[in-house]
């Protein structure tokens, strides 16, 4: 059979290989490799058992850091105390042009006469005083009868109590205009009011003269009410039941 020669061939080859290895091992010219001792590896499970878990330090064992965190205090902002500016009454506004103005209107002298019957209120004569002044920075130069101060009664009727023309006014110059209110009765329930007003000629602004052009019209009028006049009467001292005169 053919299988025996094949088996003999393989057996011969194996034997030859073994002999060749033995010869090579016995050859002293070639370096011999030392056999490393076998490492005994422990199972991974045993290594995990031998490894002790890291011990977490307890809170009492921890030493506080010597560097203390800086405590930042909130900035204390003190409210600034602002002192209100003390405004002192100064001089009237000085403009570069003329500015006639009614700077005051007040109750002046008060005189009285007895009433028509005993026990009646006295009958009074009231003086009203208006002061006209050039409060501008330029002289007021004009022609006569182009301007006047009127004291007007406004109540159940409207009428001029006084009409007084005025002329040139230097810077700071002033004129007083007075009017007499007769037969004033304190018992009047609805007393009239009075107004001091500057009146100008309608064509004064187009007459070609800038020196009589009023800079401001807002200060050309002042008013006294009937209640203010009665308050002035009530403030008079009395002697024997009669009011004295007020200068």
Image (cartoon, helix red, strand yellow):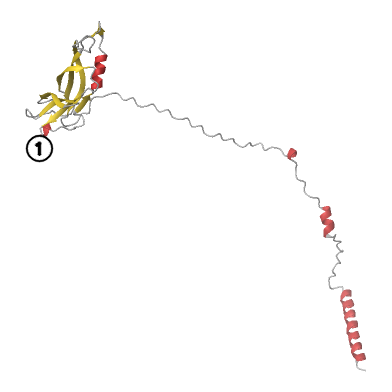
Residue shown at the point (89%, 77%) measured from the top left: 22
Residue shown at the point (83%, 53%) measured from the top left: 50
Q: Which residue is mark 1?
A: 206
Whether residue 134 is visible here, answered yes or no, is: no
The image shows residue 98 at horizontal and vertical percentages of 15, 30
The image shows residue 219 at horizontal and vertical percentages of 20, 29
As drawn, 11 above or below 204: below
Residue furthest out toward the front: 117
Residue furthest out toward the left: 144
As drawn, 78 above or below 185: below
In which image quadrant can residue 125 be found? Answer: top left
Image quadrant occupied by the N terminus: bottom right
Of residue 108 and residue 139, the one placed in the foreground of this image is: 108
In which image quadrant can residue 149 be found? Answer: top left
Residue shown at the point (25%, 16%) measured from the top left: 232
In which image quadrant can residue 183 be found? Answer: top left
The image shows residue 163 at horizontal and vertical percentages of 11, 24
As drawn, 4 above or below 28: below
Of residue 28 and residue 166, the one placed in the foreground of this image is: 166
Whether residue 163 is visible here, answered yes or no, is: yes
As drawn, 21 above or below 222: below
Of residue 20 and residue 172, the one placed in the foreground of this image is: 172
Image quadrant occupied by the C terminus: top left
- Neighbour class for label 1 at 10 Å: few (<14), some, many (≥20)? few
The image shows residue 38 at horizontal and vertical percentages of 87, 64
Dot 1: element: helix
């Amino acid at each position: 059979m053919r299988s025996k020669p094949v088996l003999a061939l393989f057996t011969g080859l194996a034997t030859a290989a073994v002999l060749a290895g033995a010869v090579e091992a016995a050859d002293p010219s070639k370096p011999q490799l030392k056999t490393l001792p076998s490492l005994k590896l422990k199972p991974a499970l045993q290594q995990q058992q031998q490894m002790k878990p890291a011990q977490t330090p307890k809170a009492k064992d921890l030493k506080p850091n010597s560097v203390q965190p800086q405590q930042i205090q909130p900035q204390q902002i003190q409210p600034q105390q602002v002192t209100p500016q003390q405004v002192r009454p100064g001089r009237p506004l000085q403009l570069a042009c003329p500015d006639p103005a009614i700077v005051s209107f007040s109750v002046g002298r008060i005189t009285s006469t007895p009433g028509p019957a005993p026990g009646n209120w006295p009958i009074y004569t009231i003086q009203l005083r208006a002061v006209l002044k050039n409060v501008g920075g330029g002289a007021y130069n004009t022609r006569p009868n182009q301007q006047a101060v009127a004291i007007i009664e406004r109540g159940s009727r409207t009428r001029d109590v006084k009409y007084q023309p005025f002329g040139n006014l230097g810077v700071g110059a002033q004129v007083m205009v007075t009017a007499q209110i007769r037969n004033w009765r304190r018992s009047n329930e609805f007393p009239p009011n009075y107004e001091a007003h500057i009146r100008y000629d309608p064509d004064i602004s187009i007459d070609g003269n800038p020196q009589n052009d009023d800079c401001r019209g807002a200060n050309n009028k002042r008013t006294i009410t009937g209640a203010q006049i009665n308050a002035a009467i009530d403030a008079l001292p009395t002697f024997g039941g009669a009011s004295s005169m007020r200068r």
